[in-house]
């Protein structure tokens, strides 16, 4: 307002000087100029308001001190390149690091002031040889951190304003971790605040310090560009997948970059991953080798301990039986061992059964545990007590011995179980019942179980399968209704279509009962019933011929002993797939006879187990197979396209025709066509085939015990040995020192020599169809 008054005063003086230059100015009251008075009058309100303003508002010419407030987060590791997790933040804050809101005052271009503020806020950074600034990179949700390169003059508030925005500013130590020791990365050498090198104690600028560290630190600490901290973390199995190694070695190409891109460290990341993978593989191999060695050592120790117990038991039995005299008025008991050895001793029935066990178990090949049993009687284990008479041995008899191996897990569990087998045997004895597993048999299966060549696992497996089949066959109704009569016409020319046709006709009857006994009648050419060739077993002979006819039916394709399903639309419409699987079920449950011609894949499909992918060899159509072979064997893309065009009709039908541009695509085309032809188009037939095995609950048992049923569905590749055939027969010789006994022993030698020659392929092989 004073300026306005001066201007007006000057204008008024100029006007007055032009008109009355000789008249002097008249002073106004108070000694003020008239113009000043008038101006004060006109602008009195403004002057009063101005006089009431605070004095601080008038000092606009003085520049206030600049301030800068941001949230900082100090990290503990010099290699950390991702944002800390919630747990890590809490741990950092507990140690005086982590997030803090910092306000800076002073010159925004002064790097030394900025450094002092940071070190004041985070005192622990003062012993780490400098620090560097990081910021989040990429999208908002990205947790990766990149380094903000230090400007020529060092980190300043101005540099942070230009590059950081309002995001959290991360700080990490430069030369060492706050808690761990590790190597660091470097930046381009320029000017900046001074800092001491912890290795050589020399002063360097912030930017020059990073270059100096690489040359000052021994190379042995940075082998393979891996920080020792990371190596230690790996060895301690405490490395985090979120940690990554950032390589910031200065080169001529990256010294002018403002930010470090994580993609530039792909090589180091791959090297670190490869190193970790190799270490993990080595650790796994070492652990597996260690476990295997420990298992072998444990097995060896167990074997030695078991052998020691066995020898000790034999010695104790020999000592006990030697102290017991054999009484002349005792009852003779004959003992038959698995090796064929037979021994006899007289016992008084009122004696303890322990004496009998000591006599049985004193032979050289005895085991620590064994069982003895009469025919049609429950087995007696050698840890039982009581008298011989109390164990239902009432007179002269033959006892069969069964050695029990210490490797029999199921039996050892019964040994260790409290109140186990003893009470069980007592219950069986008192009740007079015999369990299917314990009951001995006078048939060949009983003799095979005591053969010296039978293994424990095979015996258990066969027994379990026999038990399952026995339970299934127990559901069969012994009454044979008229609808279950099957009239069979035998074809003497070897053709089996009559057997299959007669069976389909019988199975198609509305009242035919698969759960009832079959009534089989063989009829000759004159339609007269003839009975069975084997003299009393027409059903078993019929089932054997039926399996042969099923094997040659039109629904199967493939080698003789490895059949798979073949699609037959007429058979599918008539339900022949279901009927044939029912026939196989009847053969297994009614007669105990398995097909033995299923392929491994078909058997697994029936049991609902995963199978291997289909192969080109399983395609039975030779024309289509040849087309697919041409596509697969094409050497170039044009050749493959030409082969696909030739097979366009066939491929279009199955929905596999497509255009290709790479080798992988035409391999996928061939594989998809093969899988559809072999498996896809037979899905409905397979479902119908599987449904037939529900007969008498066979399918459920097959799915539950797949490994047990494999031996009766899939060809048994185990060759028949002479010892197996020998064990099937029991020799009944005449009395000793007779002429007939001499002829019988000579014949027995001829028989055994002949089967040994057959096994050695020195004689022609034979196939017993009716055996």
Image: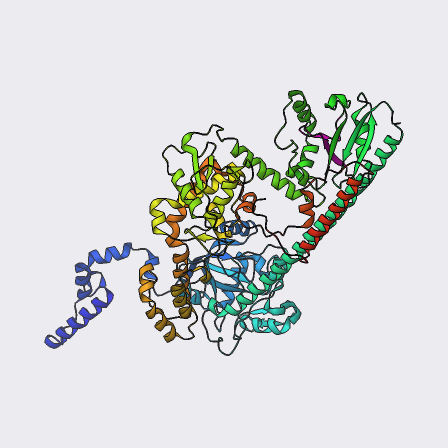
Write down the region rendered in magenta. Answer: 368-384
Relative to the observer, which residue lies in front, 30 or 528? 528
**Residue 287: image location, x then y, percent:** 66, 54
**Residue 298: image location, x then y, percent:** 73, 47
Q: Residue at x 16, y 62 (%)?
A: 38
Q: Is residue 601 left or right of residue 372?
A: left
Q: Which residue is drawn at 43% across and 33% down?
A: 484
Q: In the displayed structure, would residue 506 be above or below residue 111?
A: above
Question: Residue 218, can we see it?
Answer: no
Q: Residue placed farthest to the left in the image? A: 19
Q: Which residue is drawn at 67% across and 35% down?
A: 413
Q: Which residue is drawn at 39% across and 70% down?
A: 662
User: Which quarter of the rendering shows the C terminus?
Assistant: top right
Relative to the observer, which residue lies in front, 228 or 626? 626
Question: Residue 625, can we see it?
Answer: yes
Relative to the observer, which residue lies in front, 618 or 78? 618
User: Which quarter of the rendering shows the N terminus?
Assistant: bottom left
Q: In the displayed structure, would residue 346 be above or below residue 619?
A: above
**Residue 356: image location, x then y, percent:** 80, 29
Q: In the displayed structure, would residue 573 be above or below residue 559?
A: above
Q: In this view, does 646 lie to the left or right of 758?
A: left
Q: In the displayed structure, would residue 600 be above or below residue 174?
A: above
Q: In this view, does 547 lie to the left or right of 455?
A: left
**Displayed quadrant of residue 655:** bottom left
Q: Residue placed farthest to the front in the image? A: 526
Does the magenta-highlighted stretch encompass residue 381?
yes
């Amino acid at each position: 307002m004073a300026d306005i008054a001066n201007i007006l005063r000057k204008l008024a003086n100029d006007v007055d000087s032009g008109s009355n230059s000789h008249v002097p100015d008249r002073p106004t009251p108070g000694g003020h100029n008239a113009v000043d008075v008038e101006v004060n009058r006109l602008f009195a309100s403004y002057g009063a308001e101005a006089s009431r303003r605070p004095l601080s508002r008038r000092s606009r010419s003085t520049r206030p001190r600049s301030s800068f407030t941001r949230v900082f987060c100090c990290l503990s590791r010099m290699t950390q390149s991702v944002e800390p997790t919630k747990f890590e933040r809490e741990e950092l804050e507990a140690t005086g690091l982590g997030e803090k809101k910092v306000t800076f005052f002073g010159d925004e271009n002064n790097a030394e002031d900025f450094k002092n503020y940071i070190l004041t806020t985070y005192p622990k950074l003062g012993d780490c040889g400098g620090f560097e600034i990081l910021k989040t990179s990429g999208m908002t949700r990205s947790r990766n951190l990149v380094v903000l390169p230090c400007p020529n003059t060092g980190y300043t508030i101005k540099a942070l304003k230009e590059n950081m925005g309002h995001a959290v500013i991360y700080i990490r130590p430069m030369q060492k971790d706050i808690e761990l020791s590790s190597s660091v990365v470097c930046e381009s050498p320029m000017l900046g605040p001074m800092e001491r090198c912890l290795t050589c104690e020399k002063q360097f600028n912030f930017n020059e310090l990073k270059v100096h560290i690489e040359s000052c630190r021994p190379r042995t600490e940075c082998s393979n560009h891996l920080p020792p901290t990371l190596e230690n973390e790996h060895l301690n199995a405490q490395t985090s997948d979120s940690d990554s190694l950032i390589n910031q070695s200065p080169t001529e190409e990256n010294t002018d970059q403002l930010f470090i891109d994580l993609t530039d460290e792909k090589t180091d990341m791959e090297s670190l991953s490869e190193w970790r993978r190799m270490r993990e593989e080595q650790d796994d191999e070492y652990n597996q080798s260690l476990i295997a060695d420990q298992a072998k050592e444990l097995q060896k120790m167990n074997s030695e301990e078991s052998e020691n117990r066995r020898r000790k038991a034999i010695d104790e039995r020999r000592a006990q039986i030697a102290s017991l005299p054999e009484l002349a008025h005792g009852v003779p008991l004959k003992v038959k061992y698995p090796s064929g050895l037979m021994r006899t001793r007289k016992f008084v029935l009122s004696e303890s059964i322990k004496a009998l066990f000591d006599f049985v178990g004193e032979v050289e090949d005895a085991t620590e545990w064994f069982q003895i049993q009469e025919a049609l009687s429950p087995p007696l284990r050698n840890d039982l007590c009581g008298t011989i008479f109390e164990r239902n041995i009432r007179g002269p008899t033959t006892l069969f011995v069964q050695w029990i191996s210490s490797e029999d897990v199921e039996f050892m569990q019964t040994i260790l179980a409290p109140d186990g087998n003893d009470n069980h045997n007592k219950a069986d004895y008192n009740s007079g019942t015999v369990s299917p597993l314990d009951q001995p048999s006078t048939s060949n299966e009983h003799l095979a179980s005591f053969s010296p060549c039978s293994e424990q696992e095979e015996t258990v497996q066969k027994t379990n399968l026999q038990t399952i089949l026995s339970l299934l066959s127990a559901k069969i109704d012994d009454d044979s209704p008229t609808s279950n009569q099957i009239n069979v016409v035998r074809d003497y020319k070897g053709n089996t279509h009559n057997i299959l046709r007669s069976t389909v006709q019988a199975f198609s009857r509305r009242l035919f009962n698969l759960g009832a006994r079959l009534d089989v009648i063989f009829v000759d050419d004159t339609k007269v019933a003839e009975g069975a060739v084997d003299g009393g077993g027409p059903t078993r002979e019929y089932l054997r011929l039926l399996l042969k006819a099923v094997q040659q039916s039109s629904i199967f394709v493939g080698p003789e002993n490895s059949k798979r399903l073949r699609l037959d639309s007429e058979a599918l419409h008539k339900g022949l797939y279901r009927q044939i699987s029912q026939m196989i079920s009847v053969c297994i449950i009614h007669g105990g006879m398995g097909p033995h011609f299923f392929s491994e894949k078909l058997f697994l499909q029936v049991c609902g187990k995963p199978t291997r992918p289909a192969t080109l060899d399983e395609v039975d159509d030779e024309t289509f197979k040849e087309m697919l072979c041409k596509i697969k064997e094409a050497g170039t893309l044009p050749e493959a396209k030409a082969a696909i065009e030739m097979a366009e009709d066939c491929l279009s039908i199955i929905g596999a025709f497509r255009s290709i541009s790479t080798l992988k695509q035409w391999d996928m085309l061939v594989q998809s066509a093969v899988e559809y032809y072999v498996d896809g188009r037979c899905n409905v037939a397979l479902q119908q085939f599987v449904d037939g095995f529900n007969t008498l609950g066979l399918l459920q048992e097959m799915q539950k015990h797949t490994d047990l049923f494999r031996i009766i569905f899939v060809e048994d590749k185990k060759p028949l040995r002479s010892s197996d055939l020998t064990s099937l027969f029991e020799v009944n010789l005449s009395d000793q020192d007779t002429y007939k006994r001499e002829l019988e022993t000579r014949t027995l030698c001829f028989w055994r020599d002949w089967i040994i020659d057959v096994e050695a392929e020195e004689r022609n092989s034979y196939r017993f169809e009716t055996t």
